[in-house]
């Protein structure tokens, strides 16, 4: 059964939460080699949504079950505890906000504050008990190629175009050897949301290397950039490559398509009554803050 969102506050209340998250991001911008908390907040919003299974509508962002240790300690989510800890003070400041809304609003705020597209965000997710925590093993592994990526996203009914647009979020942040067994990029500023992921994928020379954890990754020595095998798959597969080229050449198109598929991702499995309108948030900058 679909979950029905329960709208209880108005946009001004959620803008206040947005501002609290965005302000804290500014205050703690030296986190993780100066990347700040933006990237890990975006990854958290994806992981809490990526457990969804269209077949029985289990998992997904609605119930906020990431707060329980079985989901939080999924080995494929190592490092996301930093994002959870960051949001704990926000959780205390706004006790009326559900965890599902908190985790997804964290990602939306981070994307917009990192100069990404405006993401219209709908509220009303309702906390579910620990018994509803989905099993581990629903998140993707980074070791494989295009066939794996394509079949993984079949569980979301995402097309090739949607998969390529969604993965553009890997312009943000970095891989940490102790988290995932992958490492890099080694530049210190990957906290601006742009179409650079596609540009680099297409234009730079990528050398397969075995990293210190024994995993194969694709490195560009000149720039100190890396690509996971699942990233590089978008270059290897001709059907994906078509969209990589489109987004490398048109950032507006990327922003538009990313907004659509990211919204689908964080809303999967939830029914929003028609009066439950999306909230459009102003960035701190737009508010003169
Ligand atoms: C094929 C699907 C995907 C795979 C296999 C994958 C895998 C990974 C891995 C291994 C890392 C490094 C984690 C670490 O070592 O700390 C990572 C980081 C990240 N992922 Fe993904 N990911 C996928 C899809 C996505 C999607 C759909 C999004 C968002 C829309 C996303 C956003 C991020 C972000 C922002 C980071 C950087 C986090 C940080 O800097 O701490 N990823 N991903
Ligand atoms: C440039 C690049 C490529 N792939 C990534 C995968 C995970 C996290 C960050 C990445 C990143 N900044």
Image (tube, grey):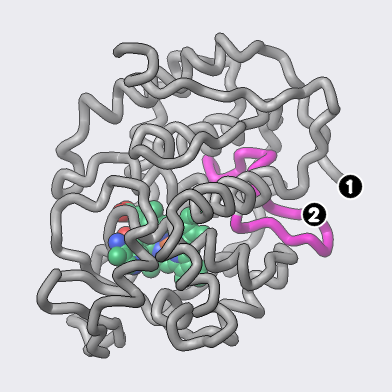
Closest to the observer, 251 or 129:
251
Query: Mark 2 and mark 1 in contact (Cβ < 8 Å)?
Result: yes
Element carrying mark 1: loop
Look at the image and say whether residue 58 sits in the magenta stretch.
yes
Instruction: Pinpoint residue 115: horizontal percent, then vertical percent.
Output: 36, 38
Q: Residues within 10 Å of mark 1 (few under 14, many from 20)?
A: few
Task: Assign the magenta stretch its main secondary structure.
Answer: loop
Single out the residue that lies furthest toward the right: 1
- The residue wearing badge 2 is 57
- The residue wearing badge 1 is 1
- Residue 47 visible in the shown view: no
Residue 99 falls in image quadrant: top right
Residue at 58% across / 21% down in the picture? Answer: 97
Left/right placement of residue 285 relative to residue 267 reads: left
- Residue 185 visible in the shown view: yes
Instruction: Pinpoint residue 29: horizontal percent, then vertical percent.
Output: 20, 34
Instruction: Pinpoint residue 146: horizontal percent, then vertical percent.
Output: 54, 84
Residue at 22% across / 46% down in the picture? Answer: 35
Left/right placement of residue 266 relative to residue 56 reads: left
Name the image quarter holding the C terminus. top left
Q: Is residue 211 above or below residue 24?
A: below
Left/right placement of residue 70 relative to residue 112 reads: right
> Magenta region: which residues?
50-68
Residue at 29% across / 76% down in the picture? Answer: 203
Alpha carbons under labels 1 and 2: distance apart: 7 Å
Q: Is residue 148 above or below residue 282?
A: below
């Amino acid at each position: 059964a679909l979950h029905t969102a329960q709208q209880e506050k108005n946009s001004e209340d959620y803008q206040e939460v947005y501002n609290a998250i965005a302000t804290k991001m500014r205050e703690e911008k030296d986190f993780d080699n100066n990347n700040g908390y933006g990237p890990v907040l975006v990854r958290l919003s994806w992981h809490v949504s990526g457990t969804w299974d269209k077949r029985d509508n289990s998992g997904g962002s609605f119930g906020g079950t990431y707060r329980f240790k079985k989901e939080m300690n999924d080995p494929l989510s190592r490092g996301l505890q930093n994002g959870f800890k960051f949001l704990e003070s926000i959780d205390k400041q706004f006790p009326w906000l559900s965890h599902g809304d908190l985790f997804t609003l964290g990602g939306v705020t981070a994307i917009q504050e990192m100069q990404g597209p405006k993401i219209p965000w709908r509220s009303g997710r309702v906390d579910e008990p620990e018994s509803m925590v989905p099993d581990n093993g629903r998140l993707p592994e980074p070791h494989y190629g295009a066939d794996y990526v394509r079949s993984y996203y079949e569980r979301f009914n995402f097309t090739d175009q949607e998969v390529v647009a969604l993965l553009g979020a890997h312009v943000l942040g970095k891989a940490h050897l102790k988290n995932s067994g992958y490492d890099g990029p080694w530049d210190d500023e990957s906290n601006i949301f742009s179409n650079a992921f596609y540009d680099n994928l297409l234009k730079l020379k990528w050398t397969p290397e075995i990293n210190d954890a024994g995993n194969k990754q694709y490195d560009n020595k000149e720039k100190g950039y890396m690509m996971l095998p699942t990233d590089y798959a978008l270059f290897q597969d001709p059907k994906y490559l078509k969209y990589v080229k489109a987004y490398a050449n048109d950032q507006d198109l990327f922003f538009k398509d990313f907004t659509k598929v990211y919204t689908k991702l964080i809303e999967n499995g939830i029914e929003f009554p028609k009066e439950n309108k999306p909230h459009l948030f102003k960035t701190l900058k737009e508010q003169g803050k």
